[in-house]
């Protein structure tokens, strides 16, 4: 019973921070997509709830040119922008923990210098629980080495590209 309560609390915490960042970006007219582990969790939970695995953070794809606007919009929803160890993130202003933050991945840029491909631009979108997610496709157009591919056992690949 305790494990179930901890899991449900984790889900609620992720839903809360994802909803806050979504509301902040959408009300400011800033394009974004939720991807990675949390997006995969939402897709899997919808189809096979027993197989859904939780992550500790939320990943979003955004344009680097919107960074200042993102920081300003997020502040209105109780989130604070941080740049730490080369990573751009949003954290809860009251409890600023990087481990449970919103990690920003930039479209049209490589996640890591050694990656061959850049993150694709925004393509198709999908909504789950009111959140804007990168569209799921049967096969990702991205190499599996990309941290944002959102691939877990039994889950669809998450791709930002509309040509999948």
Image (cartoon, rainbow, N blue to C red):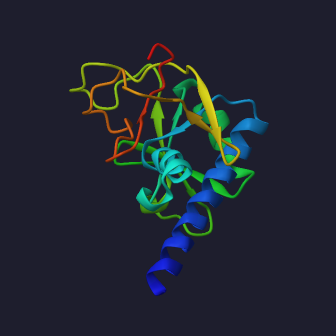
Question: Does residue 132 sit above or below 58 in this rendering?
Answer: above
Q: Quadrant of residue 113?
A: top left
The residue under the point 53% across, 64% down is 96
Outermost right residue: 27
The residue under the point 55% across, 72% down is 8
Question: Whole-percent x and y of residue 9?
Answer: 56, 73
Q: Quadrant of residue 143?
A: top left
Question: Does residue 160 sit above or below 1 in this rendering?
Answer: above
The residue under the point 55% across, 21% down is 122
* Lateral position of residue 86 relative to residue 34, left or right: left
Question: Does residue 89 sit above or below 1 in this rendering?
Answer: above
Camera-nearest residue between 153 and 16: 153
Outermost bottom residue: 1
Question: Whole-percent x and y of residue 61?
Answer: 51, 33
Which quadrant of the rendered structure holds the C terminus?
top left
Q: Residue 55: tell me if it is visible.
A: no
Question: Whole-percent x and y of residue 50?
Answer: 45, 61
Camera-nearest residue between 103 and 66: 103
Q: How many marks?
A: 0
Camera-nearest residue between 159 and 17: 159
* Lateral position of residue 144 relative to residue 70, left or right: left
Q: Residue 19: tell me if it is visible.
A: yes
């Amino acid at each position: 019973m305790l494990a179930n309560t901890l899991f449900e609390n984790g889900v609620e915490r992720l839903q809360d921070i994802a909803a806050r960042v979504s509301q902040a970006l959408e009300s400011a007219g800033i394009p974004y997509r939720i991807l990675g582990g949390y997006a995969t969790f939402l897709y899997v939970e919808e189809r096979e709830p027993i197989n859904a695995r939780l992550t500790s953070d939320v990943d979003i794809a955004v344009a680097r040119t919107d960074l200042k606007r993102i920081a300003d919009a997020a502040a209105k929803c109780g989130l604070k922008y941080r740049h730490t160890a080369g990573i751009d993130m949003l954290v809860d202003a009251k409890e600023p923990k990087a481990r449970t933050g919103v990690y920003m991945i930039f479209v049209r840029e490589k996640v890591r210098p050694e990656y061959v491909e850049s993150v694709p631009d925004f393509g198709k979108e999908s909504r789950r629980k009111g959140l804007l997610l990168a569209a799921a496709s049967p096969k990702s157009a991205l190499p599996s080495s990309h941290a944002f591919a959102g691939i877990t056992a039994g889950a669809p690949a998450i791709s930002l590209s509309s040509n999948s």
